[in-house]
Image (cartoon, rainbow, N blue to C red):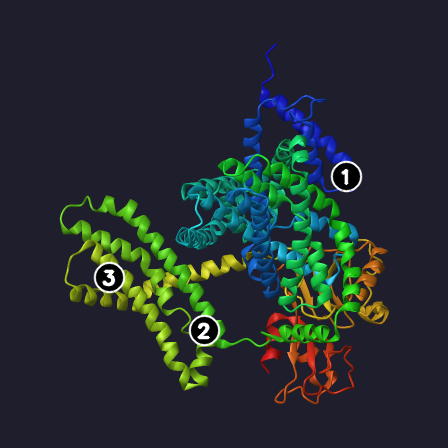
Amino acid sequence: MSELAPLLSDLALILICAGLMTLVFKKLKQPLVLGYIVAGFLASPHFSFLPSVTDGANVHLWADIGVIFLLFALGLEFSIKKILKVGGPAIIAALTIIIGMIFLGFTVGKASGWSRMDSIFLGGMIAMSSTTIIYKAFDDLGLRQKKFTGLVLSILILEDILAVVLMVLLSTMAVSNSLEGGEMLRSILKLAFFLVLWFSVGLFLIPLILKHTRKLMNDETLLIVALGLCFGMVVVAAKTGFSAAFGAFIMGSILAETVEAEHIDHLVKPVKDLFGAIFFVSVGMMVDPAMIAAYWLPILVITLTVIVGQATFATLGVLLSGQPLKTALQCGFSLTQIGEFAFIIASLGVSLGVTSDFLYPVVVAVSVITIFLTPYMIRLAEPAYAWLDRHLPEKTKAFLNRYNTGSALVGSDSSDWKKYLLDIIKTTVVNLILVVAIITLSYRFLVPVILDIPGVWGRLLSAAAVILLIAPFLRTMMIHGLRSLPFMRLWHENRVNRAPLVASVVIRIAIGLGFIVAVLGHFFHFSGFLVSVLALSLVALILTNRFLHRQSKRIEETFNANMRAREENAGERRSVVESRLLSKDLHLADFDLPGDTPLAGKTLMELGFGQKYGVHVVSIHRGDVRIRIPSAHDCLYPQDHIRVIGNDAELEAFAAALEGHHAHTVSPDADEEVTLSLVKIGAASPFLGQTVRDAGFRANYHCLIAGVEGPDGALRVPDPNVPFAKGDILWVVGAKPDVERISAL
């Protein structure tokens, strides 16, 4: 009989231990990741009562594959649009937390006498909270309807994205063993360049490939194609000096914008769960009880650092973003743990050989302790707020209220200059990077082949080929936005605007001219004057040629269509949660009605949610149909996805009532369907002196007034008979374009 290979016996031991521990931890209602860590400890040489893994190298190889799948799945969940829509509060809070915790971790490491690299990696490990653990804790504690949970999940989205960037920077530091500013700047610019390049090319080509091969795709072929793209990007990332996990995340984010995103996520999940489990088991195998006993004091200190530091910096960041003190504390106390990315960054340090042996088990111990404490810290937020509210000076509370109200109003009206400049900068940067990439690849692969043609013809054809390839992108960069609505409004509303508008076009044409001159100068050695005249002629031809106009327009329209394809897909079923939650307690929450709901067939008037619970239904999503701001005569039906607005207490009571009808809350997402915004009644407002009934918000603008905030800061239910006064702030709910129409009046 042949002897069983160590590879198979080790896999059997790992999966048996993992399976048993998942059952135990499921029964104990604890996170499964802790079960995997315990399983790894049981299968490791540190636990002598059971057989141990004999080939650690193979386990670590599987663990590396597990990291690739974890990051690929993470990318599938966090699309580019979702990242862009997390909003100002989440950005401010996430940056405050990460910068503060990295500094705090580095300080603690140096104070403990650790090396500089150990201290840097420690800062990175404790900077990121655990999305998985927090999500489960909110679910277990029934807090998903609370206002602060949407902001916490938005912060976690950004933290996960920044964690991937941090891994790239840590890898650069580890390889160069240096913290020089110039090296770091080059790394950041290189990262930005390849990010834009990969996303631009990927979002243009991959949706087209999937669209044209859709009839050939079944579950098997789609899974193989998705994994092929994932590992292909892993190889490309490794070749350009980035980590394999970074490449997997990028491909996941690109595929997240396609109409097949949910299908791919569903197909990849079992594979991710298998290899992810092996990764977390390998983490547990690194746990050495002797090492933990020897480093019990640093473990205690780091645990306190994580809990106190995360709570402090998160609360401060959320306060700085303009949220109320209660929301800030709830967010801060929810983020007091470290999880998956701590293990991934720790394994990165081990694989690069730049961290000490003790750091891995120390961080694992800290993670286990902080994960166990997470539910208790979340519950502690409200008592902490009550204590602070009693002891804070009245002046401090008044200042926080003023700051909160002022921040909520910032950006309520958008500037045409802001829209125009952001659009121009985005388009210019993307097309410049594409032009640089095309020139670089052409010089390396295409030009050497064409130059084999003897005489001047080889150089002439090479220059013509390169210019023809970059021409559509140069044209888009040079004249993009000339017919846009912000440009036309700025041009006609004030003659003073015309000079800077013309300058913005001239600068871009000059940049395009510079590229043409550089290409011509590479192949020919004419005088500067002759090259300039020839370049100007080519730029004029690029701007006026109809074929290039059609090509550049087709490329831009295809790219924009690919970006919109997922949200426009008729079969897509999205859950929508407001990413930029505003002040006070009023916010939006989502629910799904089951197939056997007794609410079916009843109108909103008959159900009387407003009278019973104080909440209002602001949208109904039924298959392909969306009803925004439904009327009192609209009915609810089985499988409806409804969105309601209210404060924490009202939504909690509404959710409890729906539980009796077996409805369930929906997972948060950062896309927007119905938005909540603030509109201030000024002296020139057309709504000044009008009542809710007179203004006709529902009939004329398809919007709902959820509340009216007076100059004293008190939020009241809108009275249809009370006219709006100067200084009133309307809480408007509706589709984003409709809300913007009201804001612009």
- Judged by depth in the image, the label closer to the viewer, 2 or 3, is 3
**Callout 3 secondary element:** helix
Instruction: Tell me the residue at 49%/37% (across/down).
Output: 352
Relative vertical location of residue 491 with respect to residue 418 in this rendering, above or below:
below
> Residue 302: image x %, image y %?
65, 46
- Foreground pick, 603 / 122: 122
Q: Which mark is residue 124?
A: none
- Foreground pick, 713 / 522: 713
Callouts 2 and 3 close, C-beta under 8 Å: no
Callouts 2 and 1 close, C-beta under 8 Å: no
Relative vertical location of residue 7 with respect to residue 418 in this rendering, above or below:
above
**Callout 1 secondary element:** helix
- Judged by depth in the image, the label closer to the viewer, 3 or 1, is 1
Q: Residue flagged by tag 1: what amino acid is it?
A: Lys
Dividing the picture into quadrants, the one containing residue 516 is: bottom left
Q: Residue flagged by tag 3: what amino acid is it?
A: Val
Relative vertical location of residue 361 with respect to residue 733 in this rendering, above or below:
above
What residue did someone put label 2 on?
484
What residue did someone put label 1 on?
26
Q: Residue flagged by tag 2: what amino acid is it?
A: Ser
Total count of labels: 3
- Foreground pick, 275 / 570: 275
What residue did someone put label 3 on?
517
- Foreground pick, 484 / 554: 484
> Residue 395: image x %, image y %?
72, 76
Instruction: Tell me the residue at 22%/54% (across/down).
Output: 522
